[in-house]
Image (spheres, helix red, strand yellow):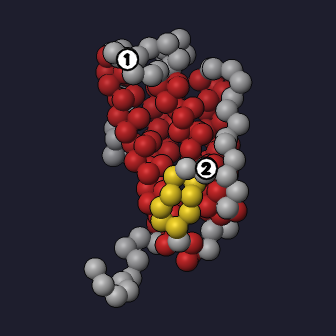
Amino acid sequence: MTGSAAAFLSPDAFLRHWQGHRKLTRRMIQAFPEDKLFTFSVGSMRTFGELALEMLAMGAPMARGVATEEWKSYALPEGKTRAEVLEAWDASTKEIDEFWSRIPPERFQQRMTAFGQYEGPVHELLLYVVDNEIHHRGQGYVYLRELGIEPPHFWERD
């Protein structure tokens, strides 16, 4: 594509989309029995609790890094209970909102190196975080079905 084009998605629309996925992932975490969140997996895949911690390590730190150009890892919860993961999830959701409002619109087209190793346009770095969450949530769907639990509908993101 040549020339300039209108943005397909505004920063506010992207944030609503991302936070919709985060709401759904939160419901997935809630759906896991307490004793299975950090113990149940299929094959050699990680538990959904471990995957949730990875998502926590990426979401808010990415928003913070894009806004401030300072790349710090997220402080993960010490314990491994569902309540602690949900509390950290809620805190990181608020942090994403806080830092999102500080991102200048032109920054989404700039190139950055996230966490000292992932280089690319900011919008692609952010899309990767959302894609990673969707991917791991899909693993969670498999786990819940294996446990005989009906997972939340993937299209319900409110």
How busy is the neighbourhood of tag 1: few (under 14 within 10 Å), some, or many (20 plus)? few
* Residue 12 pos. (x, y %): 52, 67
- The disc label shown at residue 60, or none: none
Instruction: Kindly identify which residue carries mark 1.
Output: 44
Quadrant of the image occupied by residue 148:
top left
Q: Point out the tag, 1 or 2, that comes first from the N-terminus.
A: 1
Question: Does residue 156 appear to the left or right of 53 in the view shown?
Answer: left
Q: Amino acid at mark 2?
A: Phe
- Residue, x 39% and y 42% (percent of image)? 134
Which residue is the extreme one toward the bottom?
A: 3
- Residue, x 41% and y 77% (percent of image)? 7
Q: Can residue 99 be seen from the camera position used here? A: no
* Residue 96 pos. (x, y %): 62, 54
Please give the count of numbered marks on the rendered protein: 2
User: Which residue is nearer to you in this view: 85 or 156?
Assistant: 85
Q: Can residue 31 be seen from the camera position used here? A: yes
* Residue 51 pos. (x, y %): 49, 30
Secondary element at image label 2 = loop
Secondary element at image label 1 = loop
- The disc label shown at residue 115, or none: 2
User: Which residue is nearer to you in this view: 75 or 37?
Assistant: 75
Quadrant of the image occupied by residue 154:
top left
Q: Amino acid at mark 1?
A: Ser
Which residue is the extreme one toward the front?
A: 117
- Residue, x 68% and y 20% (percent of image)? 79
* Residue 34 pos. (x, y %): 54, 16
User: Which residue is nearer to you in this view: 131 or 2?
Assistant: 2
